[in-house]
Image (cartoon, helix red, strand yellow):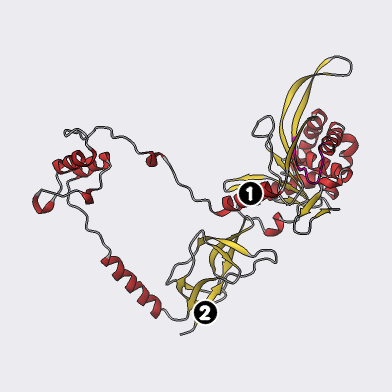
């Protein structure tokens, strides 16, 4: 019989390992060529691995949650079902040998045992044919836990600490997020600079443009304006548009502007990348953000969607909060947190109290690369652009 191993393939040049997600077949299944066998999570992207063979699944060599490297055998496929059937019979015999006899007890006695946290397998029954009685359970409790002999069936027992806890394995995208954030904290010297920006003119401009975007089924948020302004700011402050190569001890300045946008998904925070934002209009950026966000929430992002970012933005303004300390998406040098736009009374240059739309921004940066003074200049440049959008943004709509 021809037996063939299906090994972990090289999904992309930079991907050397992955985490086993859902296993889509079971032993004994007949599979066709190109039929998905299992899912592998690599760099926050789920990839279905198709079968290169046709035949029966003889043996599955991995389990969900395993971390495997390229070349690791995942399962065995054969062209005969004989071995599979034999394996099933052996497994059935093993399960019959391991079967545990259920102790004899009336439903009311079982309920009492559950309320008291007693395993009936540990209680010796004195009733007919070894049946466990209510007295047997109470006697067991009295001897082992030294509580009062008379216990009412409906008495509330003390709840164990473990029963109020839920254990959730760190797997899948959450594991990747944890590993990446730990690496960022270990390598980058995180520093925070907070500033405020008058968004009044952007708010007005967005209201005008919404009439255009609604006809195109595009949801226009403030984020495209911020992204466009960030691209212009990065050109004036190039050390923020960079990565750190710790192995070579080098800072790599990027001459292109790919902005990673944090998206909140059911599986955790994912950062797809909007490419070449300096060359795109506000509406084009809005459309791309919408498409990437939908793909992220549906688990349909590709590795290309997540790669080659040069700067990151995390926008929590729609949720709330004053400001935060975002974690840098290492090896990038900085990340900008944008927050809720609030109406605030401001004293203008004429000593008049006016109401303006104010937004806090939180700039996290790697102090190994950028000094605090340059961070302050960065947010002041960004503020100037957003406070005068007609000058810097309107031509790019």
- Compared with 194, 106 (above or below) is below
Asked if the residue under mark 2 is in contact with the one under mark 1, i.e. CB atoms within 8 Å, the reply is no
Circle 2 residues within 10 Å: few <14, some 14–19, many ≥20: some
Label disc, if present, on residue 182 of the rendered structure: 1
Residue 397 visible here: no
Q: How many labels does the image show?
A: 2
Find the residue positioned furthest to the bottom.
1
Is residue 17 found left or right of 260 in the rendered image? left
Q: In this view, does 13 lie to the left or right of 146?
A: right
Mark 1 or mark 2, earlier in chain: 2
The label nearer to you, 1 versus 2, is 1
SS state under label 2: strand
The residue lying furthest to the left in this view is 128
Residue pictured at 25% horizontal, 59% vertical: 100
**In the image shown, does 177 or 182 lie closer to the viewer?**
182
Q: Is residue 364 magenta?
A: yes
Observer-nearest residue: 372 or 331?
372
Q: Name the residue under label 2.
A: 4
Q: Where is residue 275 in the image (x, y as percent from the top left)?
A: 78, 52
- The residue carrying pointer 1 sits among few (fewer than 14), some (14 to 19) or many (20 or more) residues within 10 Å by Cα, namely few
On-image quarter of the C terminus? top right
**Numbered disc 1: secondary structure:** helix
Which residue is pictured at 76% across the width and 27% down the height? 358
Q: Give the range drawn in magenta.
A: 362-372
């Amino acid at each position: 019989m021809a037996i063939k191993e299906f090994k972990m393939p090289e999904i992309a040049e930079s991907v050397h390992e992955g985490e086993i997600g859902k296993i889509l077949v079971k032993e004994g299944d007949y599979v066709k060529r190109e039929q998905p066998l299992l899912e592998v999570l690599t760099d926050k992207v789920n990839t279905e691995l198709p079968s290169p063979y046709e035949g029966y699944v003889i043996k599955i060599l991995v389990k969900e949650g395993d971390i495997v490297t390229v070349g690791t055998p995942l399962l065995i496929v054969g062209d005969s079902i004989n071995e599979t059937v034999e394996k099933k019979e052996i497994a059935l015999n093993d399960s019959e040998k391991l079967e545990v006899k259920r102790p004899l007890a009336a439903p009311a006695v079982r309920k009492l045992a559950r309320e008291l946290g007693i395993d009936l397998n540990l209680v010796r029954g004195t009733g007919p044919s070894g049946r466990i009685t209510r007295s047997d359970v109470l006697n067991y409790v009295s001897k082992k836990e030294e509580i009062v002999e008379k216990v009412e069936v409906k008495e509330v027992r003390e709840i164990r600490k473990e029963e109020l806890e839920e254990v959730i394995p760190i797997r899948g995208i959450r594991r990747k997020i944890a590993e990446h954030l730990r690496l960022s904290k270990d390598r980058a010297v995180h520093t925070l600079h907070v500033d405020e920006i008058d968004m009044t003119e952007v708010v007005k401009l967005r209201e005008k443009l919404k009439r255009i975007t609604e006809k195109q089924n595009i949801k226009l948020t403030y984020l495209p304006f911020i992204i466009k302004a960030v691209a212009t700011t990065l050109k004036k402050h190039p050390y923020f548009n960079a990565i750190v190569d710790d192995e070579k001890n080098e800072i790599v300045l990027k001459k292109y502007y790919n902005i990673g946008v944090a998206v909140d998904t059911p599986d955790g925070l994912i950062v797809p990348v909007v490419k070449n934002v300096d060359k795109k209009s506000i509406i084009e950026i809005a459309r791309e953000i919408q498409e990437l966000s939908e793909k992220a929430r549906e688990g349909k992002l590709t590795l290309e969607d997540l790669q080659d970012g040069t700067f990151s933005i995390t926008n929590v303004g729609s949720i709330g909060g004053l400001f935060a300390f975002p974690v840098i998406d290492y090896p990038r040098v900085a990340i900008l947190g944008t927050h809720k736009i609030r109406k605030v009374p401001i004293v203008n240059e004429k000593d008049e109290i006016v109401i303006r739309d104010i937004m806090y921004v939180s700039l996290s940066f790697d102090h190994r690369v950028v000094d605090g003074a340059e961070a302050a200049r960065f947010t002041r440049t960004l503020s100037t652009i957003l406070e005068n959008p007609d000058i810097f943004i309107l031509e790019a709509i």
